[in-house]
């Protein structure tokens, strides 16, 4: 008899608990080849892209965002950053890192990052404010030192935000659009029993469902394999082997 594990399906996803950070960190390391530092005396994770241009830092802090994603390209001068509060569901952060590590990332042309929100029925003004249909998520583009940055806040109760996200004005539109797409996705997210502790039940729909234990255990490895396969399929075909040298005869 197969073992079953009960997990909660929670919607809207933006009011779910943070989830497992490995959904982001392990996927970057094992699925996209990002290297990681190791400091056993500090509760933090630092991951660096293979080209050394992008870095993700996860560092718990009561008064600051926990997640920091930054990019610096000395050749092109491209510099941008994004950050996410500790309560941000990992699926939203993963949407950004998955887009960044996509081999086709640089070919994406996004004119309006708000388009995924409008398609999902959100109230969104181009280059301005937006909000979810239930009014639990609000966002805006605000001026900071002459730049138009993005700020997103999720609040089960309007005066009690559970997470905030920031993108500076130089963040590629494709990454912002990926975040917006994940934000508006109606698909519920899965959480274990311990990950539902403290959730406000007034603003979410949560029901429990059983899955085979093997399926639950395979969720992250399967995700890593899917991400890794993107890079494998993007590799150019190997050049044909040269023909064997003709034999010399006496």
Image (cartoon, helix red, strand yellow):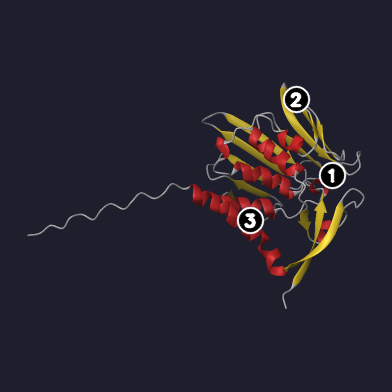
The residue closer to the viewer here, 181 or 164, is 181
Q: Is residue 37 visible?
A: no
Discs 3, 2 touching: Cβ within 8 Å: no
* Disc nearest the viewer among 3 and 2: 3
Q: Disc 1 marks which residue?
A: 162
Number of numbered discs overlaid on the protein picture: 3
**Residue under pointer 3:** 223
Percent coordinates x, y for residue 16 in the rendering:
81, 50
Element class at badge 1: loop
Judge depth for marks 1 and 3 and give the one in front.
3
Neighbours of disc 2 within 10 Å: few (<14), some (14-19), many (20+): few
**Secondary-structure class at tag 2:** strand
Name the residue rendered at 17%, 55% in the picture. 246
Q: CA distance from mark 1 to mark 3?
A: 26 Å
Q: Quadrant of the C terminus?
A: bottom left
Q: Earlier in the sequence, mark 2 or mark 1?
A: 2
Mark 1 surroundings within 10 Å by alpha-carbon count, few (fewer than 14), some (14 through 19), many (20 or more): many
Residue furthest to the top:
146
| 120 relative to 21, above or below | above
**In which image quadrant can residue 66 be found?**
top right
* Closer to the camera in the image, 128 or 194: 128
Q: Residue at x 70, y 45 (%)?
A: 93
Q: Is residue 197 left or right of residue 148?
A: right
Q: Is the residue 211 above or below the residue 174 in the image?
A: below
* Mark 2 lies on residue: 144
Q: Nearer the viewer, mark 2 or mark 1?
A: 1
Instruction: Look at the numbered disc 3 and give the secondary structure of its residue.
Output: helix
Asked if marks 2 and 1 touch (Cβ < 8 Å), the reply is no
Image check: 84 left or right of 28?
Answer: right
- The answer to whether residue 162 of the structure is visible from this angle is yes
């Amino acid at each position: 008899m197969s073992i079953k594990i009960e997990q909660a399906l929670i919607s809207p996803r933006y009011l779910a608990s943070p989830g497992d950070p490995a959904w982001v960190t392990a996927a970057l390391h094992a699925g996209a080849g990002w290297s990681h530092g190791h400091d056993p005396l500090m509760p933090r994770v630092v991951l660096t892209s293979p080209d050394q241009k992008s870095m993700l830092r996860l560092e718990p802090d009561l008064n600051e965002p926990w997640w920091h994603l930054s990019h610096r390209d000395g050749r092109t001068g491209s510099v941008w950053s994004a950050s996410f509060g500790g309560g941000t569901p990992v699926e939203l952060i993963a949407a950004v890192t998955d887009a960044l590590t996509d081999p086709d990332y640089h070919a994406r042309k996004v004119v309006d990052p708000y388009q995924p929100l409008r398609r999902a029925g959100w109230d969104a003004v181009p280059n301005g404010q937006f909000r979810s249909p239930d009014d639990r998520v609000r966002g805006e583009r605000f001026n900071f030192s002459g730049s138009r940055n993005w700020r997103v806040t999720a609040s089960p109760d309007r005066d009690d935000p559970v997470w905030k996200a920031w993108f500076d004005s130089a963040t590629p539109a494709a990454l912002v659009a990926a975040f917006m797409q994940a934000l508006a996705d109606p698909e519920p997210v899965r959480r274990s029993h311990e990950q539902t502790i403290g959730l406000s039940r007034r603003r979410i729909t949560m029901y429990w469902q059983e899955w085979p234990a093997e399926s639950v255990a395979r969720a992250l490895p399967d995700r890593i394999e899917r991400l890794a396969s993107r890079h494998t399929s993007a590799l150019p075909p190997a050049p044909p082997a040269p023909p064997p040298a003709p034999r010399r005869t006496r």
